Amino acid sequence: MGGDRRLPGDGVNVAVIGTGRVGLVTGACLASLGHTVACMDADETRVAMLREGRAPFYEPGLDDLVGDGLASATLRFVDTVAEAVQGAEVAFICVGRPPVGRDDRSLSAVEDAARAVAKSAPQGLVVVVKSTVPPGTNRRVAQVVATERADLEFDVASNPEFLREGRAVEDTLRPDRLVVGASGERTLDALRRLYEPILDAGCRLIETDPATAELAKLSSNAFLALKISYANGLARLAERTGADVADVVDILGSDPRIGREFLGAGLGYGGYCLPKDVAMLEKTASRAGYDFGLLREVARINDEAVEAVVRTVEEAVWNLEGKRVTLLGAAFKPGTDDVRAAPSLTLARRLLDAGAEVVVWDPKAAKHAAEELPALGISEDPYEAAVGASCAVVCTDWPELRELDLGHLGGGMAERVIVDARNALDEEEARAAGFRYVPIGRAAD
């Protein structure tokens, strides 16, 4: 992928610090454009896996890019920062942030990465913060680097990512916009050269200051979360008024000023980014002296969405204690194996606490779900997962769900009940297969 957009001559020497979902995708994609990339991670097991051409997580197209990069020697993996930045012109900091629920000011991984880069950095290095961080982080990174190496000539820039898990490779190679926050023309020139093939293909480049770039990233994710919570608030209202939330949001989304994406009512948002970024933006506002209470309400409605599904399952099966409930899907969204802050796991915990037996099927994430919640049963087959169940709950809108033989699924269940917490299935098909079909955001039968 991206081979038709390689640079015509020598590319840029790039270091990427961190091989998580952002760092590895960034490094592999830049290598596919003809740059020479060294990706660093302190986890020796992960580095060994990557050197064999195996990505440590599922992302469509990523394994191929890693393999191609290794074969062409444009991509290598190292376990020290010093080796990664040797000869580099640009170094990306792509380290993780604190888990959801931790103080968002704890950005020690970013600080540690900046110190390590500074110790071994060549003169003229451009340090690019790609991790999602609160406004002012670039200034702090510059201070850390200058303190660590008073002799070093360097620049610091913000280049936030706008990647969607499940489409991260596509979003990196064919983004709808590139945002660069920098204060100097030399830095901007370096990043223009880095992204030249993407810009030549017509991508819009937005050049701004670092604080604006940092705030723009947080604002984007928080707004997406707001849309999801708005749809879930409408779902609660639709259930009480006899309206159909699916039709409501279709009508809303037909307005080009609003758009249909991220207006799906159901279990709510999850993953590593949206919950954290909503909290980070609210705390950033609070520290700046502004009470951005809307963001707290976004998070509250998101929590409420899971509780609403718990109540729906309870109503459907009457007593949860001793009942088997099958969760169809564990990943927080389709196209990924990521279960971090997945609402499906919050739902599973609530059902387990109520005395239910919970079994999960997911085409990519079942193993990770069981690692997060060992009390879960897992099955590699959706039909086996449903055997003996009193209720099946659609938790992740995988395309595979629409290919299921619902008659076969229901044949092994103790009761044919589906709670469609993503409004993903065809209602008429489910009812024709003998199911009591319970969607989200519609009046009860």
Image (tube, rainbow, N blue to C red):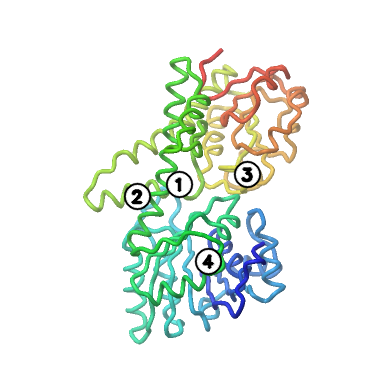
- Residue that carries the numbered disc 3 in the rendered image: 370
| Residue placed most toward the observer, 243 or 114 | 243
The reply to whether discs 3 and 4 touch (Cβ–Cβ < 8 Å) is no
- What amino acid is found at the position of numbered circle 4 in the picture? Gly
Q: Please tell me whether residue 418 is drawn above or below residue 370 in the rendered image.
A: above
- What amino acid is found at the position of numbered circle 2 in the picture? Leu
* Res 56 quadrant in image: bottom right
Counting residues from the start of the chain, the first of labels 2 and 1 encountered is 1
Quarter of the image with the N terminus in it? bottom right
- Residue located 49% across and 64% down the image: 94
Cα gap from disc 2 to disc 1, whole angstroms? 10 Å
Cα gap from disc 3 to disc 4, whole angstroms? 26 Å
Nearer the observer, disc 3 or disc 4? Answer: 4
- Residue that carries the numbered disc 1 in the rendered image: 274
Q: Does residue 291 appear to the left or right of 433 in the view shown?
A: left
User: Crowdedness of circle 4 by 10 Å Cα count: few (<14), some, many (20+)?
Assistant: many
- What amino acid is found at the position of numbered circle 3 in the picture? Ala
Give the numbered dot on residue 18: 4
User: Residue 205 location, x and y as percent?
Assistant: 45, 62
Cα gap from disc 1 to disc 3, whole angstroms? 23 Å
User: Residue 14 location, x and y as percent?
Assistant: 53, 75
- What amino acid is found at the position of numbered circle 1 in the picture? Leu
- Residue that carries the numbered disc 2 in the rendered image: 281
Q: Does residue 334 appear to the left or right of 289 in the view shown?
A: right
Q: Secondary structure at mark 3?
A: helix
